[in-house]
């Protein structure tokens, strides 16, 4: 019994630590472009993507954060952050220049 108790305490502490450090739920109201950018980067990093934020603008009741892949200036993601709840939606984009003059 004396060996089990420290193991049980260690397991409970590890579980509490993992729960505290895990991903948070919705972030709540998002009032600044900096906060929207942070939430967008967190979501992309959770998906294994490291992209640079180009722009964050408020459009109605959501923030639109534009990111760019570091390897390519033509690909990235549009990240939509709900201003009220902080819920994040990610859409991929690929820009192509057509009809370019030489």
Image (cartoon, grey):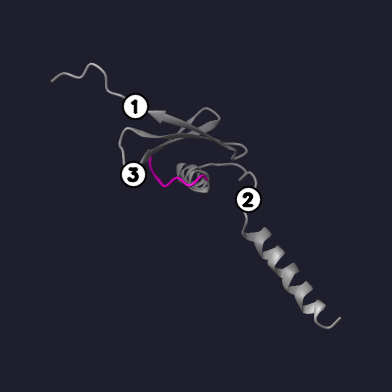
Instruction: Give the alpha-carbon distance from disc 2 to disc 3, as whole Å.
Output: 27 Å
Q: Count residues near mark 2 (Cα–Cα under 10 Å), then give few for <14, some for 14-19, many for 20+.
A: few
Residue furthest left in the image: 102
| Image location (x, y in percent) of residue 64 | 47, 33
Which residue is drawn at the image coordinates 36% and 40% (left, top)? 69
Above or below for 59 versus 37: above
Give x and y (percent) for residue 85. 62, 38
Check residue 50 for magenta coloring: yes
- Residue at coordinates 62% horizontally, 55% vertically from top-left? 22
Q: Name the residue at the top extreme.
A: 99
87 shown above or below 10: above
On whether residue 34 falls in the magenta region, the answer is no
Q: What element carries label 1?
A: loop
Q: Which residue lies under the disc numbered 1?
A: 95
Farthest residue to the right: give it: 1
3 or 1: tag closer to the N-terminus: 3
Residue 88 as seen in the image, left or right of residue 33: right
- Magenta residue span: 47-54
The residue beneath circle 2 is 24
Q: In this view, does 58 lie above or below 10?
A: above
Callout in the foreground (1, 2): 1
Residue of label 3: 70
Q: Quadrant of the N terminus?
A: bottom right
Q: Nearer the viewer, residue 79 or 2?
A: 2
In 3D space, how far apart are the residues under numbered discs 1 and 2 (Cα atoms)?
Answer: 32 Å
């Amino acid at each position: 019994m004396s060996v089990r108790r420290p193991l049980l305490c260690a397991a409970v502490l590890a579980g509490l630590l993992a729960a505290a450090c895990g991903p948070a739920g919705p972030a709540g109201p998002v009032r600044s472009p900096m906060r929207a950018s942070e939430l967008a980067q967190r979501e992309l990093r959770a998906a294994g993507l490291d992209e640079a934020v180009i722009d964050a603008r408020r459009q109605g009741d959501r923030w639109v954060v534009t990111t760019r892949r570091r390897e390519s200036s033509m690909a990235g993601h549009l990240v939509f952050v709900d201003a009220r709840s902080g819920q994040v939606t990610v859409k991929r984009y690929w820009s192509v220049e057509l009809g370019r003059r030489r």
